[in-house]
Amino acid sequence: MDALSDVLRDAGLRRRLLDQRAFHARGALRFPCERSMGFHVVMRGRAWVHGPDLAEPLALGAGDIALMARGCTHVLATTAQQPAGEIAVATIANGVPIAVPDTATVVVSGAYQFWNAPVHPLFASLPAWTRVQAGHDPADAPLAALLPLLAAEAGREGPGAEAILHGLLDAAFVYLLRAALRGTPVLGWGRGIDDPRVRRAIGLLHAEPGRDWTLAALARDAGLSRSALALRFRAATGETPLNYLRGLRMQRAMRLLGESARPLESVAAEVGYQDAFGFSRVFKRVVGLSPSAFRRRDAAERASPMRL
């Protein structure tokens, strides 16, 4: 089981392409991205990201990428000082070609919307911002190869351009997540998938989150003793296997509640709970809302024009 792909699917991420931008001298745009992950790729020139989670502006040169792992309103500018006064809000262009002057800073941006705050530990373990210099680390060579293709497709209207652009955008996003996970602290989800045995245990839980797992059964299937799995899992991720399973189940339940009208009992059973009452108690403790309240809020917010 590909755990990362599973996490992204359960978190309900939806792609919003922001396209290629040309910034003139002292240009700036404000990105209202409170409920998104996203990235900016500087194809030419220099740019700075100004955001609430940054102690100082994040400087980007040609070929550099800024990955935003936690949603926030931020400003992308061509100066290290955030421009004063009113700053225009970035809008979604979705592949419309632009004229790019030779002197302009050129940036390609992409966003992935998550309407409900994810509870899976992957998202907490990622740094708020990561700068990736695509040509510096050999592990990022595929990402560096993607960037010219991404920029080329962002500025044309050829047959199939939208499909190509979206595919490149998705590939770049996952490569960026890999790069960010390589830089995570000693404890965290990224550290867990670096350990082959822990990664196998995580994959087993993702493959069958509704199974009545015990530590003994998981350890046996992962090829370890109970004590060895417990120690290695906590040493790598900072939590126990069964605590991880609870968060995984709640993330899956959020998707099921939002995407279907299935009865609560059916959702509870799919994520491994024998009764709706026990499931509801855990869901409220982890998510902060009862399943019914979560479903009502999610349904009401679907009317927002910003939601995909």
Image (spheres, rainbow, N blue to C red):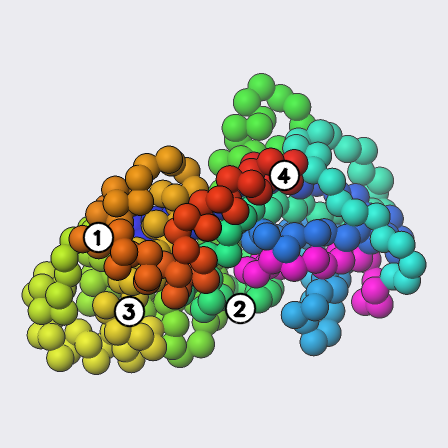
Q: Which of marks 1 and 2 is in front?
A: 1
**What is the CA distance from the residue labelled 3 to the residue labelled 4?**
34 Å
Q: Nearer the viewer, mark 3 or mark 1?
A: 1
Q: Mark 4 points at which residue?
A: 304
Q: Nearer the viewer, mark 3 or mark 2?
A: 3
Q: Which amino acid does label 1 sit on?
A: Asp
Indicate whether residue 74 is drawn in magenta. Answer: yes
Magenta residues, start to end: 65-82
Q: Where is residue 215 in the image (x, y as percent from the top left)?
A: 14, 69
Q: Which of marks 4 and 2 is in front?
A: 4
Q: Is mark 4 on a helix, strand or loop?
A: loop
**Is 9 on the left or on the right of 55, as rendered?**
left
**What is the CA distance from the residue labelled 3 to the residue labelled 2?**
22 Å
Q: What residue type is labelled 3?
A: Asn
Q: Name the residue under label 1.
A: 275
Q: Name the residue under label 3.
A: 243
Q: Which of marks 4 and 1 is nearer the N terminus?
A: 1
Q: How crowded is mark 2: few (under 14 residues within 10 Å), some or many (20 or more)?
A: some
Residues at marks 3 and 1 touching, judged by CB atoms closer than 8 Å: no
**Is 116 on the left or on the right of 255, as rendered?**
right
Q: Which amino acid does label 4 sit on?
A: Ser
**What is the CA distance from the residue labelled 4 to the residue labelled 2?**
28 Å
Q: Position of residue 24 (x, y in %)?
A: 86, 48
Q: Position of residue 231 (x, y in %)?
A: 21, 80
Q: Which of marks 3 and 2 is nearer the N terminus?
A: 2
**What is the CA distance from the residue labelled 1 to the residue labelled 2?**
37 Å
Q: Earlier in the sequence, mark 3 or mark 1?
A: 3
On residue 127, the disc is 2
